[in-house]
Image: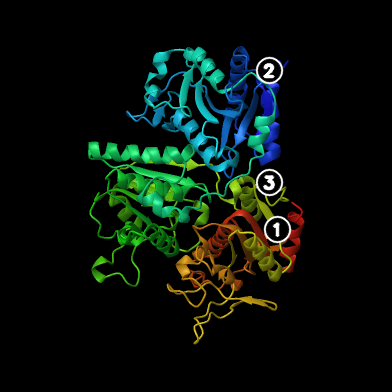
C-alpha cells in the first residue's frame, strides 16, 4: 500500500539523502515491475527532504510518513500520507500531502480547476488542491477504517519552491477546506501551524498500521450507480487525470460557447482506467449545468445496459444514450457536448443494410460525430479494437481533425481501476499476448489481484462458482471458436461451447430474456448470466469481480510464442480473408483476448483448450499466490 514507511527525523538524519530516491526506485521496481521516470526520481530527491525538514522544525519529526501511498483499488498514489494522532482527541489522524516543485503557476484561461505551469509540457494541469481533495474523498469512501471518522483526514498541496506569493496568487481562488489547503514556501509558517492542529508530536506506528491494514470497501461499479450519477449527484470521486479530463471538457464547453468555436478532446486509457466513469460524470454534470449533451457508443450491449440502469425510474433519460450511427443527419454543432464512449469502436462509415438510400454516402463516421457538437469527446483504448472496420484511434482522430482545420487536446489516463488497480496484471496480459515488446514472463503475484490456471473447464466453472457463493460476481467468457446456434424450438439455448464432456451455451442472441438467460445486452450485469459463456461483444465495456476466460484453438502456443489459427475462428466478421488479411486477423484475435482477460476486478481464472498452451500457462502462473 506504500512504497516506503519512514519519518522526517530519519530522512533529515540520512548521511546520503540521495539514497532516499534509490530506496523508492528499488521498491517501485519490486512492487510494480516498472521503473520510475526521471522526473519522478527528481521529485523524490528534491521534495521529500524539504517536507522532512519542515516537519522536524515543527516538532513533528517522529510522525510517520507513508511515501507514495497507494490508494486502494487503483494504481493512483498520493505523494505522502502523514499518519499520527490528533493533538486534541488522540484518535488516528492523517494528512495527505501533494508535493509540487512549481515556483510559478496561473489559472488556465480563468478556470478555477485547471492551471498552467510555465515551462511544463503537456498543456493544462489539474489544480493540486483539487488533486489532494479528491485523494481525501476517495480514501474516505474506500478505507473502512475512516468510514466513521469524519475528522480523521486533512489534505494539503505544498508548493515548496514558490517563494513569491504573487507567482501563484491565481491558485488561491480554489475554495479552502480541511481536505483542500494550499501552502507555499512563502507561507511555510502557516503550514506548520496547520499541521500541528492535525498531528501531535507523539511517535508510533499505530495510525500507519491502521490505515495500511484497513479493509477496503468494494469498488462502486459503474452500472450500479449510473442512474444516480446522471440524475441526482456525482457518485464517483475522480482522481488525477480523470478529474483533469472532466475539468478540461467543462472548461472547453464554456470557451467554445463564448467564442462560437469548436474543440476536440481525446481521452485514452486502458481497461478500467475510468473512461466510462468520466463519460457518466460529464453527462450528469453538463445536464445539471443546462448544457445540451448526449452519450453515444458503438456497443449495443453497453448502450442498452446504460439505458436500462440510468433510465430505470426516469425513462426519458434513456434518450440521452445513442449509437455512433445515429448522427448522420445531426445539425452541425447542435449539441454542446457529444460524449463518445468506447470510441475505439467507431466505424469507417455509418452506412449499414438498414440505412435509407438518400443517406448512403461515403462520409466518414468520425466526421459526423465531430460535426454534431461544439466539443466532441472521444474516450478510447486502442488495444480494444476487435472487429474489422473499427477505426477509432488517437492518430486517426487527430489526422481527420487536421484535415478540417481543427486541433485536438489529448489526456492519457495512466491509472488503473479494473483488475484491482493492478498495473502489473495488465502489463502481464499485454506481454503474454505479444501486444507490447518483451515477451511473456512468470506472473509474480499481486496482493491486489489473483490469477489462476484451471486444468479443465469444469474446474474453471467450479472456481468461479465458489466465488459466487462468497458473494462475488463472476462470468465465463471464451474466444469465438464454436458455432453459435439459434435457440431450440422449446426456447432453450443449445450448448454450443463443447470441450470434452463439458458444454455450455453462448449468451443469448435475443434482446429479451430466454428462460433464465438474460437478454444479450444485459448478460454481463443481470442475474442468470453465469450459466452461459459470453463473447467479446457482450463482455467489452463491462466488469465483474471474478473473470473466467477460455482460450480457444484460435490462439495457441507454438515455438515459443502465441500463434493465431484462422481456421479455428468462427467469427463471421473474420471469414473474408480479403477484407481481413492475416496480419489484421492476428492483431484482432490478440486484442479480443486482451479484452476478455481484463474484465475482472478481483481475479481471473484461465483455461486453454490446447494442451501445449495449458503447459505454458501453468509454467507462467503459480496457483499458490
Q: Is residue 246 visible?
A: yes
Q: Earlier in the sequence, mark 1 or mark 3?
A: 3
Quadrant of image for the N terminus: top right
Q: Secondary structure at mark 1?
A: strand
Measured as percent of width and height from the top left, residue 321 is found at 35, 58
Q: Tell which tag, 1 or 3, sits nearer the viewer.
A: 3
Residue receiving disc 1: 452
For label 2, count other residues whose C-alpha is less than 10 Å away and answer few (under 14), some (14-19) or many (20+).
Answer: some
Q: Is residue 98 above or below residue 473?
A: above
Q: Earlier in the sequence, mark 1 or mark 2?
A: 2
Residue 447 numbered tag: 3
Task: List the single residue furthest toward the bottom.
Answer: 489
Residue receiving disc 2: 9
For label 1, count other residues whose C-alpha is less than 10 Å away and answer few (under 14), some (14-19) or many (20+).
Answer: many
89 sits to left or right of 255: right
Q: CA distance from mark 1 to mark 2?
A: 43 Å
Q: Secondary structure at mark 2?
A: helix
Question: How was the colour assigned to the protein in this rendering?
Answer: rainbow
Measured as percent of width and height from the top left, residue 571 is found at 52, 71
Amino acid at each position: 500500500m506504500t512504497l516506503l514507511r519512514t519519518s522526517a527525523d530519519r530522512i533529515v538524519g540520512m548521511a546520503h539523502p540521495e539514497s532516499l530516491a534509490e530506496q523508492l526506485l528499488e521498491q517501485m521496481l519490486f512492487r510494480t515491475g516498472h521503473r520510475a521516470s526521471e522526473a519522478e526520481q527528481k521529485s523524490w530527491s528534491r521534495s521529500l527532504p524539504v517536507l522532512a525538514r519542515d516537519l522536524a522544525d515543527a516538532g513533528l519529526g517522529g510522525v510517520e510518513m507513508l511515501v507514495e501511498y497507494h490508494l486502494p483499488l487503483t494504481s493512483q498514489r498520493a505523494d505522502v500520507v502523514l499518519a499520527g494522532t490528533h493533538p486534541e482527541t488522540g484518535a488516528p489522524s492523517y494528512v495527505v500531502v501533494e508535493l509540487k516543485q512549481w515556483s510559478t503557476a496561473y489559472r488556465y484561461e480563468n478556470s478555477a480547476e485547471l492551471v498552467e505551469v510555465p515551462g511544463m509540457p503537456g498543456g493544462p494541469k489539474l489544480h493540486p488542491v483539487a488533486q489532494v481533495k479528491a485523494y481525501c474523498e476517495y480514501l474516505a469512501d474506500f478505507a473502512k477504517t475512516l468510514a466513521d471518522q469524519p475528522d480523521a483526514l486533512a489534505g494539503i498541496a505544498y508548493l515548496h519552491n514558490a517563494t513569491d506569493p504573487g507567482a501563484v496568487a491565481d491558485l488561491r481562488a480554489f475554495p479552502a477546506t480541511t481536505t483542500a489547503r494550499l501552502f507555499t514556501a512563502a507561507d511555510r509558517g502557516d503550514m506548520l501551524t496547520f499541521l500541528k492542529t492535525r498531528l501531535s508530536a507523539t511517535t508510533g506506528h499505530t495510525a500507519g498500521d491502521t490505515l495500511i491494514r484497513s479493509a477496503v470497501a468494494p469498488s462502486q461499479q459503474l452500472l450500479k450507480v449510473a442512474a444516480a450519477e446522471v440524475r441526482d449527484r456525482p457518485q464517483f470521486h475522480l482522481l488525477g487525470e480523470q478529474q483533469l479530463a472532466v475539468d478540461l471538457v467543462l472548461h472547453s464547453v464554456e470557451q467554445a460557447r463564448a467564442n462560437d468555436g469548436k474543440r476536440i478532446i481525446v481521452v485514452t486509457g486502458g481497461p478500467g482506467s475510468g473512461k466510462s466513469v468520466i463519460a457518466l460524470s460529464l453527462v450528469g454534470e453538463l445536464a445539471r449545468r443546462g448544457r445540451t449533451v448526449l452519450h453515444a457508443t458503438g456497443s449495443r450491449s453497453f448502450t442498452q445496459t446504460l439505458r436500462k440502469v440510468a433510465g430505470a425510474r426516469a425513462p426519458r433519460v434513456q434518450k440521452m444514450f445513442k449509437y455512433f450511427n445515429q448522427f448522420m443527419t445531426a445539425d452541425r454543432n447542435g449539441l454542446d457536448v457529444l460524449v463518445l464512449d468506447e470510441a475505439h469502436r467507431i466505424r469507417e462509415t455509418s452506412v449499414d443494410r438498414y440505412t435509407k438510400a438518400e443517406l448512403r454516402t461515403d462520409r466518414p463516421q468520425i466526421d459526423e460525430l465531430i460535426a454534431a457538437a461544439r466539443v466532441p469527446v472521444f474516450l478510447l483504448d486502442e488495444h480494444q479494437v476487435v472487429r474489422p472496420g473499427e477505426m477509432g484511434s488517437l492518430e486517426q482522430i487527430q489526422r481527420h481533425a487536421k484535415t478540417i482545420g481543427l486541433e485536438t487536446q489529448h489526456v492519457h489516463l495512466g491509472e488503473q481501476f479494473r483488475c484491482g488497480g493492478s498495473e502489473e496484471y495488465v502489463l502481464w496480459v499485454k506481454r503474454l499476448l505479444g501486444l507490447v515488446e518483451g515477451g511473456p514472463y512468470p506472473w509474480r503475484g499481486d496482493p491486489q489481484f489473483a490469477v489462476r490456471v484451471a486444468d479443465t473447464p469444469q474446474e474453471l466453472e467450479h472456481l468461479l462458482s465458489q466465488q459466487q457463493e462468497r458473494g462475488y460476481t463472476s462470468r465465463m467468457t471464451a474466444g469465438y471458436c464454436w458455432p453459435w446456434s439459434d435457440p431450440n424450438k422449446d426456447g432453450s439455448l443449445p450448448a454450443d461451447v463443447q470441450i470434452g464432456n463439458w458444454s455450455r451455451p453462448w449468451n443469448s442472441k435475443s434482446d429479451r430474456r430466454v428462460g433464465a438467460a438474460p437478454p444479450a445486452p444485459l448478460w454481463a450485469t443481470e442475474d442468470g448470466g453465469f450459466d452461459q459463456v459470453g463473447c467479446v461483444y457482450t463482455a467489452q465495456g463491462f466488469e465483474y469481480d471474478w473473470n473466467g476466460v477460455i482460450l480457444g484453438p484460435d490462439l495457441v502456443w507454438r515455438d515459443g510464442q502465441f500463434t493465431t489459427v484462422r481456421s479455428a475462428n468462427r467469427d463471421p466478421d473474420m471469414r473474408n480473408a480479403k477484407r481481413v488479411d492475416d496480419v489484421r486477423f492476428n492483431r484482432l484475435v490478440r486484442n479480443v483476448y486482451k479484452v476478455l482477460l481484463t474484465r475482472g476486478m478481483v481475479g481471473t481464472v484461465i483455461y486453454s483448450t490446447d494442451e501445449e498452451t495449458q503447459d505454458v500457462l501453468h509454467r507462467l502462473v503459480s496457483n499458490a499466490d
